Amino acid sequence: MPARYQTSVDPSVASDAAILLTVEEKREVIVTNAATCPAKGYVDMDSRVDAAAAIGALIRFDNVLNQQVKVEFACDDQTRTGFCKDGAAIRRELKLLRPREIRGGGSAVTLMFLGKRNLTLVSLDTARPESVQVRNIIPPAS
């Protein structure tokens, strides 16, 4: 579990004196063919998504990318890069990205991908398995 520590900026306090503020549970999943657990490549899970749904979404996403299931894309591209040109372009662009987080609610699961200047959201809904919603957006500056 990741922990967050606070240290003092007071020079009279020893630099190794840290106070534990919180401990946060980190939930991650990965789909792999490896015999052992990989060191990287895990996807963070929102607390509303259980592990089975997250793994199912990652497998379904892989099947969509590799055209093992027939889907129709509903795509919105705020970046004007040609991301949504057609199904082949969408698949090609998504293959370049690695999912960072899985969020959920109801029958839908959303995979989040963070690019250099864009955020891509892919929603997979078990109630509508033939449809994949894709949004490629430029997040507001923080």
Image: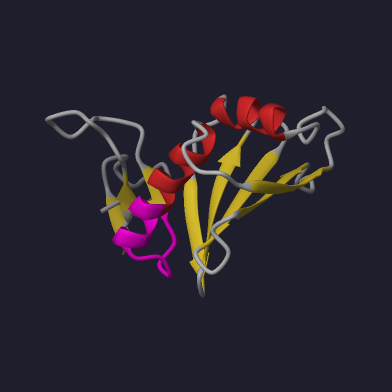
State whether residue 47 appears in this view: yes
Q: Is residue 118 above or below residue 3?
A: above
The percent position of residue 23, horizontal first and vertical second, equals 30, 61
The percent position of residue 91, horizontal first and vertical second, equals 62, 31
Residue closest to the far front: 70
The percent position of residue 2, horizontal first and vertical second, equals 30, 51
Depth check, front residue: 31 or 128:
128
Residue drawn at x 71%, y 37% as measured from the top left: 118
Residue drawn at x 52%, y 40% as measured from the top left: 64
Residue drawn at x 44%, y 47% as measured from the top left: 60
> On the picture, is 141 further left or further right than 16?
right
Chain part drawn in magenta: 45-56
Q: Is residue 16 magenta?
A: no
Q: Is residue 11 above or below residue 96?
A: below
The percent position of residue 8, horizontal first and vertical second, equals 40, 50
Q: Does the magenta stretch include residue 49?
A: yes
Which of the 4 image quadrants contains residue 137? Answer: top right
Residue closest to the far right: 80
Depth check, front residue: 53 or 4:
53
Which of the 4 image quadrants contains residue 85? Answer: top right
Which of the 4 image quadrants contains residue 51? Answer: bottom left
Q: How many marks?
A: 0
> On the picture, is 10 further left or further right than 119?
left
Residue closest to the far bottom: 106
Depth check, front residue: 97 or 9:
97
Color style of the picture:
secondary structure
State whether residue 8 appears in this view: no
Residue drawn at x 59%, y 55% as measured from the top left: 130
> On the picture, is 51 further left or further right than 11?
left
